[in-house]
Image (spheres, rainbow, N blue to C red):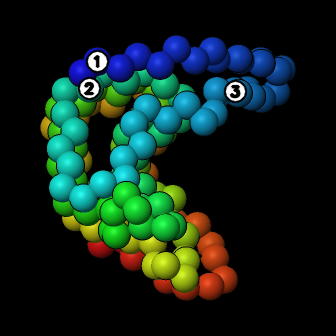
Amino acid sequence: VTIFIDSEVTRIFKRISLDVTYALNTDGLDIQSENATIYNNVITNYDDAIVAKPCNAAMTICHCSSNMMIYNNTVTYSTGLTIGSVSPSVNTECIRNITFRDSTVHQPLKAIYVKSNPGTEGDAIIE
């Protein structure tokens, strides 16, 4: 599978500082799954390239996003290979056993990124 996400980048140069605005909410692949293998993708974007996300709150997709092997991907720009966002929830948001390997990231804002979000109720698990 080859994926190319065409996002426009706007750059505003100022005399003292450099402000860069990226096209947000352009995730390449958002994965909510148990026992998934994701490989051989080419992704160019300005948000998360490949994201292991918690299962949906109703848990109709899965109970805990887990056992994912993500490898041999090529990513340009982006905020990288990501786990999350994982927020405390009364249903216990959960991500377990995610492996990123043998991937290349060119000119990233971040390469590997774990996103936990604050919350006031419930639990969240990242293992």
Residue visible at 65% across and 27% down in the picture: 22
Question: Regarding mark 2 in the picture, which secondary structure is present there?
Answer: loop
Residue furthest to the front: 60
Q: Residues within 10 Å of mark 1 (few under 14, many from 20)?
A: few
Q: Residues within 10 Å of mark 2 (few under 14, many from 20)?
A: many
Instruction: Give the residue pinned by disc 1.
Output: 2
Instruction: Give the residue pinned by disc 2.
Output: 41
Q: Are marks 1 and 2 in contact (CB under 8 Å)?
A: yes
**In front: mark 1 or mark 3?**
1
User: In 3D space, how far apart are the residues under numbered discs 1 and 3 (Cα atoms)?
Assistant: 27 Å
User: In 3D space, how far apart are the residues under numbered discs 1 and 2 (Cα atoms)?
Assistant: 5 Å
Mark 3 residue type: Val
Return the disc, 1 or 2, that comes first in the chain's sequence.
1
Question: Regarding mark 1 in the picture, which secondary structure is present there?
Answer: loop
Mark 2 residue type: Asn
Q: Measured from the top left, where is residue 71 in percent x and y? A: 18, 39
- The number of numbered discs placed on residues in the rendered structure image is 3
Quadrant showing the N terminus: top left
Quadrant showing the C terminus: bottom left
Residue visible at 45% across and 72% down in the picture: 93
Residue 20, labelled with which disc?
3
Q: Are marks 2 and 3 in contact (CB under 8 Å)?
A: no
**In front: mark 2 or mark 3?**
2
Left or right, 82 with reference to 42: right
Mark 1 residue type: Thr
Left or right, 63 with reference to 48: left
Question: Regarding mark 3 in the picture, which secondary structure is present there?
Answer: strand
Q: Indicate whether 112 appears above or below 55.
A: above
